[in-house]
Image (cartoon, rainbow, N blue to C red):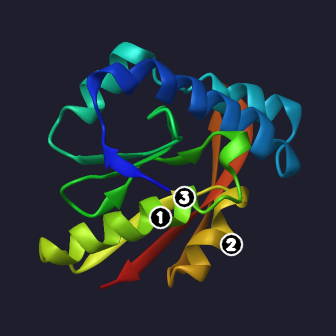
Amino acid sequence: MPVRRYRPDDASRLSDIYKAAVLVIGARYYSPDQLRAWAALAPTPKRFAELMGDGRIALVATDKDDQAVAFADLEPDGHIHFLYAAPEAAGTGAVSTLYDRLEEKARDLGFIRLYAEASEAALRFFLKKGFTKTARREFEVEGVPIHNYAVEKRL
């Protein structure tokens, strides 16, 4: 699976991937109300362009036509904010490849810890990659109760 750095022309596609991943992949684990609230948090293309241009490491996995099918980022403090795949890319190794590249870059930069907030859909993935679940996080999004998990990995 090809992986490259994020480019500004990816922003619209990343917004679409985020929403589709939440609504389709997340549907196995969360209620329709939870999915609607979570999907409403999807950054707009403009916001993605701002976020991905703020100094973080931002990578995309691409199809044969160089179109993003999954994306991930790594903030300067070791936080993985985004790790999402289009539903059609789920199970193809795209996310695993992206994560492996992020971890490699983190190690090269001397990071000692990675951490993230993992959805029910992502928790098993993070655990397989050597993360530890540190807490279940209960919160509300637009008045709708939802949860995820704090996970971390020492490098």
Residue plotted at (58% across, 33% down): 18
Q: Amino acid at mark 3?
A: Val
Determine the secondary structure under disc 1. Answer: helix
Nearest to the observer: residue 58 or residue 54: 58
Identified at 41% across, 16% down, the residue is 45
| Quarter of the figure with residue 37 | top right
**Coordinates of residue 1 in the picture (x, y in percent):** 50, 56
Label 3 Cα neighbours within 10 Å, binned few <14 / some 14-19 / many ≥20: many
- Disc 2 versus disc 1: nearer the observer: 1
- Find disc 1 in the rendering and name its residue: 97
Task: Kindly identify the residue that appears in the image at 72 percent across and 57 percent down.
Answer: 121
Q: Which disc is residue 124 wearing? A: 2
The numbered mark at residue 95 is 3
Q: Report the Cα–Cα distance between label 3 and label 1.
A: 5 Å
Q: Which of disc 1 and disc 2 is earlier in sequence?
A: 1
Q: Picture quarter containing residue 36?
A: top right
Is label 3 in contact with label 1 (beta carbons under 8 Å)? Answer: yes
Which residue does the image show at 65% across and 67% down from the upper left?
123
Q: Which numbered dot is residue 120?
A: none
Amino acid type at mark 1: Thr
Quadrant assignment, res 51: top left
Q: Front-most of 30 and 48? A: 48
Q: Element at badge 3?
A: helix
